[in-house]
C-alpha cells in the first residue's frame, strides 16, 4: 500500500483507493548504498566519481566551442570532460526487482554524462546568418553540428571483466561553477527500490479535488521522490512529459539556481535501446 493509500484509509476514504490507482506511476528510487570494505567495486551502480568503461568506449568529451552572435564578441568554451552523473549496472537493477516491467535492459551498463554547462546548441544554430558556431574535436578538426554533444547517455552490454575505472582525459568545464564548487561530483554507490508517484491530474479529478480542502496537505507526498528512474518529473520548474515520453533519470544536482536535471526519452526509443535519442532538461529557479 502506498503512503497516499494509507492516508486515504486513515481519513476513512479507502473507497477512493481503486480510483486513485489509475493515477499511479511506477518508478525506481535510487538509494545510497554502502559496501563493507568502503571502496565501490568496479562495475557497481553509483553516482558521481569516475566511470567504469570498457576499452571500446572513449571517455565522453564536450568539444571545444567557439561562437559569435552577429555584432558580438567571440565566445569560447575549451574542450572539457563530461562528468559522470550516474552509471547503472543493469543486472543489479534487474535483480533488485524494482523494474518489474523490464523497461530497462537486464544486462550491461547505462552511463549518464553531462558537461555541466548551458552551452547547448540546436543544429539550426550552426547555420543561422546571425549566429556563427564552430566546434573542434580533440584532434583539432571541426566537428559537424550533428556530432556536437554536451551530454551523453551510453548503453553498453559486454564482458563486465573488461571494465576499468577511467580518469577524465582533460579538465571538467569550469564556466558553470565559477570556482565555487569542487570539480568532481561526490561519489556514492546506489541501490534500487520500487516506488510510486501520482500524476498531478489526481488533484484535479472530480473524485479527489475536494480532498485538499477537507484535508490540507494530503497530496504533498504524492510526488516527492527526487533521484529516480521512471516516474513523474518533480521539482520547482519540472518538465512535463508528453504521452509517449519516459523519465529516464531525475537527479538532484542542487547547485546554485539548478535543482534537478532530467533525461527524457520516448518510450519506443527506450524499448529499442536507442539511448542516444534521450535529451536533457533542467529545473532552474
Image (cartoon, rainbow, N blue to C red):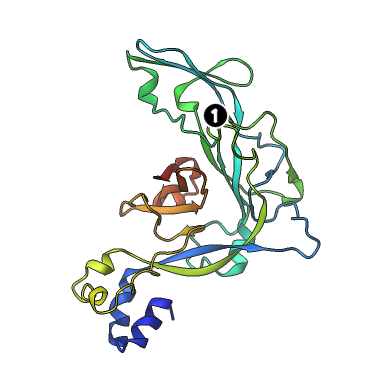
Residue 177 falls in image quadrant? top right
Instruction: Say whether residue 67 is left or right of residue 51.
Output: left
Residue 271: tell me if it is visible.
Answer: no
Disc 1: which residue: 175
Q: Residue at position x 53%, y 33% from top?
A: 176
Q: Position of residue 58 (x, y in %)?
A: 66, 34
> Which residue occupies the foreground of this view, 34 or 123?
34
Q: Is residue 84 visible?
A: yes
Left or right relative to 241: residue 91: right
Q: Residue at x 39, y 59 (%)?
A: 232
> Residue 223's x, y, as percent?
39, 64
Q: Which sits in the foreground, 26 or 173?
A: 173
- Position of residue 262 measured from the top left corner of the image (x, y, whole percent): 45, 48
- For the residue carrying disc 1, how many other residues have a C-alpha within 10 Å: few (<14), some (14-19), or many (20+)? few
Q: Is residue 96 above or below residue 183?
A: below
Farthest left residue in view: 206
Amino acid at each position: 500500500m502506498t503512503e497516499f493509500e494509507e492516508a486515504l484509509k486513515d481519513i476513512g476514504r479507502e473507497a477512493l483507493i481503486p480510483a486513485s490507482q489509475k493515477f499511479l506511476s511506477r518508478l525506481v528510487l535510487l538509494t545510497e548504498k554502502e559496501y563493507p570494505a568502503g571502496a565501490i567495486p568496479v562495475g557497481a551502480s553509483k553516482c558521481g566519481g569516475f566511470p567504469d568503461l570498457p576499452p571500446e568506449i572513449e571517455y565522453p568529451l564536450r568539444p571545444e566551442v567557439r561562437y559569435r552572435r552577429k555584432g558580438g564578441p567571440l565566445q569560447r568554451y575549451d574542450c572539457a570532460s563530461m562528468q559522470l552523473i550516474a552509471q547503472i549496472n543493469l543486472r543489479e537493477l534487474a535483480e533488485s526487482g524494482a523494474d518489474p516491467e523490464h523497461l530497462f535492459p537486464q544486462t550491461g551498463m547505462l552511463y549518464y554524462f553531462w558537461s555541466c554547462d548551458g552551452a547547448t546548441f540546436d543544429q539550426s544554430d550552426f547555420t543561422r546568418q546571425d549566429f556563427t558556431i564552430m566546434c573542434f574535436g580533440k584532434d583539432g578538426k571541426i566537428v559537424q553540428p550533428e556530432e556536437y554533444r554536451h551530454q551523453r547517455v551510453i548503453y553498453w552490454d559486454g564482458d563486465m571483466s573488461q571494465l576499468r575505472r577511467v580518469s577524465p582525459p582533460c579538465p571538467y568545464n569550469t564556466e558553470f561553477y565559477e570556482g565555487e564548487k569542487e570539480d568532481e561530483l561526490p561519489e556514492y554507490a546506489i541501490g534500487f527500490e520500487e516506488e510510486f508517484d501520482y500524476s498531478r491530474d489526481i488533484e484535479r479529478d472530480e473524485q479527489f479535488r475536494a480532498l485538499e480542502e477537507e484535508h490540507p496537505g494530503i497530496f504533498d507526498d504524492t510526488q516527492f521522490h527526487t533521484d529516480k528512474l521512471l516516474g513523474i518529473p518533480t521539482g520547482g520548474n519540472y518538465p512535463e512529459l508528453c504521452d509517449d515520453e519516459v523519465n529516464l533519470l531525475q537527479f538532484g544536482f542542487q547547485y546554485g539556481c539548478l535543482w534537478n536535471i532530467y533525461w527524457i526519452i520516448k518510450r519506443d526509443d527506450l524499448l529499442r535501446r536507442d539511448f542516444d535519442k534521450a535529451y536533457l532538461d533542467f529545473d532552474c529557479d
